[in-house]
Image: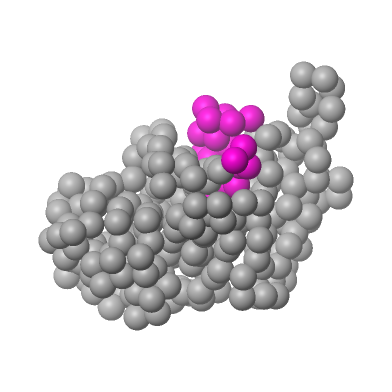
Amino acid sequence: MKVTVLGYYGGYPTRDIGTSSYLVESEGYHLLLDAGSGSLLALEHHVDPLALDAVLLSHYHHDHIADLGVLQFTRQLKRDEHGNRAPILPIYGHSDDEQAFEKTTMEDVSQGVDYTESDQITIGPFEVSHLKTLHPVTCYAFRIVERNTGKVFVFTADSGFIEELIPFSENADLLITDTNLFRGMENHLVHMTSKECGQIAHKANVKTLVLSHLPQQGNLDQLRKEAAEEAPKTKTILAEKDLEIIV
């Protein structure tokens, strides 16, 4: 399994870096995890948007779905080298926000699929389970397991700290966390601090921790150091645009 960071800021893009979006690949299958601002242009450096097999959305805040509409337009208007249009794209979202979920379906382009109808769903070579997070709108974290290898990638999406994230992340090979806040702002109701992310990684025995959904201001290396102090046995790194991680 390969995970590529397409955008990593929370809230808004800046300095040619977009907001939350990741490309998850295995066995020739291409899954787009969230579709933040700037993600479509970043995606083109790795795979043609027509080659995407599915999209998985944690929630419907703009910094996680800003490019979803233009992705749908791309699939509607663009043709491959043989003049063929792309097949209908499954977009996995939750139906707690019915109006937003309805927009994941576009005639002859995409079909919305509600992942909350079961505890675990199959998306290509992956088994995906979800966990509701602490956020102002309904949002879900994902535990993505590559069936053939058993490798585990956990994405917290947006969340304040909740104890449930520890067992949900247990023994993950890769954990990407919402790390929008510096140490000292613990128990926030919207996002997590570096300290909290490090504690999750340590208690869950995570191999690699990637801090993402980063703030636009401040010393980000300090953010990394704060997380690393809590998880001395975990490799802790900052998200970077186009960073590729082999899980």
Q: Residue furthest top?
A: 81
Side of 141 where 88 appears, left or right: right
Q: Nearer the viewer, residue 234 or 59?
A: 234
Is residue 177 positioned above or below 243 on the image? below
Q: Which residue occupies 47% across, 42% down? A: 2
Side of 97 where 84 appears, left or right: right
Side of 51 where 135 appears, left or right: left
Q: Residue furthest front?
A: 148
Q: Quadrant of residue 176?
A: bottom left
Location of residue 43 in the rendering, given as x and y in whole percent from the top left corner: 55, 35
Side of 29 where 64 appears, left or right: left
Let me know if residue 185 appears in the view: yes
Q: Nearer the viewer, residue 66 or 111?
A: 111
Q: How is the image coloured?
A: one colour
Read off the magenta span: 27-48
Location of residue 210 in the rendering, given as x and y in whole percent from the top left corner: 32, 52
Q: Is residue 45 magenta?
A: yes
Let me know if residue 18 appears in the view: no
Location of residue 25 in the rendering, given as x and y in whole percent from the top left corner: 55, 42
Q: Which residue occupies 73% across, 62% down? A: 113
Location of residue 86 in the rendering, given as x and y in whole percent from the top left corner: 79, 36
Q: Which residue occupies 71% across, 67% down? A: 114
